[in-house]
Image (spheres, coloured by chain):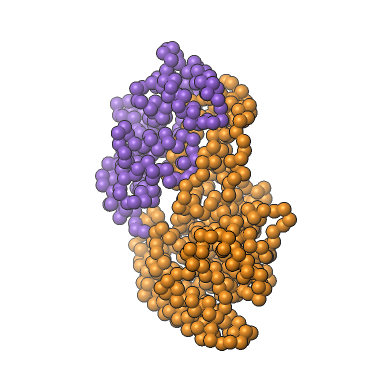
Amino acid sequence: MFFWNWVKYSTSVLSTEKRNASPVLSVVPGTDRLVLPSHSSSAFPSLGSLYTNRGRREGGSMEQEMGELRRYRTQSISRGEFALSDSFYFYRKGLESIVDDQVTQRFSSEELVSWNLLTRTNHNFHYISLRLTVIWGLGVIIRYCVLFPLRITLAIIGLSWLVIGTTLVGFLPNRRVKNWLSELVHLMCYRICARGLSATIQYHNKNNKPQKGGICVANHTSPIDIVILANDGCYAMVGQSHSGLMGVIQRSMVRSCPHVWFERSEMRDRHAVTSRLRAHVAAKSNLPILIFPEGTCINNTSVMMFKKGSFEIGGTIYPVAIKYDPRFGDAFWNSAKYNMVSYLLRMMTSWAIVVNVWYLPPMTRQEGEDATKFANRVKSAIAHQGGLLDMAWDGSLKRDKVKEEFKEQQQKMYSSMVVGKKARNSQEPHTESTRR
Amino acid sequence: MGSTNSTLSRIPNVEELMQETGFTPAHIVRLYDRFEALDKEKTGHLRPQDFGAINRLAMNPIGDRIIGSFFSTGQETVDFHSFVRILAHFRPADKNRPKDPSMPQPVNSRTSKLKFAFQLYDQDKDGKISRAELLQVLRSMLEMQVTEEQLESIADRTIQEADLDKDDAISFEEFRKSLEKVNIDHKMSIRFLR
């Protein structure tokens, strides 16, 4: 209880900045331009990334930079011409991307501006003073010896109650009582689990909460997102059926209310997936489905491309923006670096998980709008509300390589400067429209 | 995560490296983390494929050349020391360095940066950028956007302008002269390596 109040107090004291009306930065893919809307004024406190700041300061588009490189030449740029220094631009960009790049950055934890006494978030840790080390040492003791055992106990209680409770409810035949009880059980378990992570969640705009028969869409940072959202309402989960402990939990959950679990083989067949989800949504009494269209965990500083599959199902979309406060604990799951168990361990030994959840007004696909455009519209709304960078890069770039089209785009831009507009005759723009 | 000291102690000859390149311990640690992140199979070396995984680089028209500049002739892997040495070329120049002609040029001086850029063009390392080499670079930057004739005429024009001794190739001195007025330090430095 005491700890609870302390967390609440410290969040209110520390978070004096308003997060609601944050400016939107969007990155134009294929170039390095960051586009700022004209009304933005405040800086991004949580974006400790040096790359973004540098991008804004120098603001060099290809034309601008080339222009500067060629300033010493007597001929004008409009005549076009190659200069030996043109390659410097590409050279520099290439080396910058070797040192750090926008996309890979999203898959590692956010760098904080000031240290929060967790070594894991400090990249340049070096000895500053004895006092600080002592405070840090105290922090470690409190986190590992006091908080962690309490949290583990709560988590175990929560999970076991989930399994037992849902199995018990599953035996009941009656429809209405069963639904009511299953909601109760689910809510209770998720609340206990949330306490087990010391999660302080603030929900905004509860009037926009997802209704039955709808689809809830949110940005993805970690598996804990499910716990966070389910604390306030019941959702039908969508996912792959696992074996082991996860499988036990999944099977018992399904007994009390319909969730949608897919076998691994079914996942590959997009058509089958879509039709099953459509069937679920069509039955208006079913709980809203929870989907994370990014497909993978991103580090909560930006929102990556939404996969259009979720937006083809039809029905009403209820977008939700989730923003974690990085000062109390880093919620991002870097699946390449940590497995689930060590991730949960890290979660339970942070100070706390402080989250803001915004429910956005429902959206539907408009006439003549295709799934991709609709997905982007929803993505911008979520990014805008949560104060995240709206990026058009694909989250699967974590694992796959970039398409050839981007390279051609760069070449096209450069050639129009060197040879002028008459060069752009034989190449059709079909490469741009096939971008998914 | 670990402190700077523990990471630094894992790198052999790190003092020498810092001396040579002028990077601070924090930079070295940052670059080491990046090196490890790129070295997915944890071999302690990077191969061209590891660089290829960087999306922004794959999209760069001269990305392959940039990757090639990390590997000296005949070598197939690059270790951390070479990695840092190459990147040191792009460190912003130290403003207050005393001009001592007897000391060797630091690796991020204007001349060294120019030499490095020269090597980008001069792939066979004969000290001259021949017409063919220039064409190659042009081709990678422009690929399918221009015709072969246009490429040739651009190459001819460029050599004509820069070639002072009329040997149909651009030597390092001619290269340096034609780029006299360009602010090399600004254009060939990566800001956050300061």
Q: Is residue B95 among what the camera can see?
A: no
Asked where in the image residue A367 lies, by quadrant, the reply is: bottom right
* x and y, in percent, of residue A189 in the image: 51, 79
Q: Decide: is B120 above or below B26.
A: above
Outermost residue on the top side: it is B166
Q: Nearer the viewer, residue A5 or A159?
A: A159
The structure residue drawn at horizontal position 35% and vertical position 63%, both measured from the top left corner, is A133
| Residue B146 located left or right of residue B172 | right
Outermost residue on the left side: it is B13
Q: Which chain is orange?
A: A
Q: Which chain is purple?
A: B
* x and y, in percent, of residue A44 in the image: 56, 54
Asked where in the image residue A233 lies, by quadrant, the reply is: bottom right
* x and y, in percent, of residue A34 in the image: 58, 45
* x and y, in percent, of residue A14 in the image: 54, 65
The structure residue drawn at horizontal position 36% and vertical position 26%, both measured from the top left corner, is B124
| Residue A426 located left or right of residue B13 | right
The structure residue drawn at horizontal position 42% and vertical position 27%, both measured from the top left corner, is B121
The structure residue drawn at horizontal position 54% and vertical position 41%, both measured from the top left corner, is A405
Please give the count of numbered marks on the rendered protein.
0
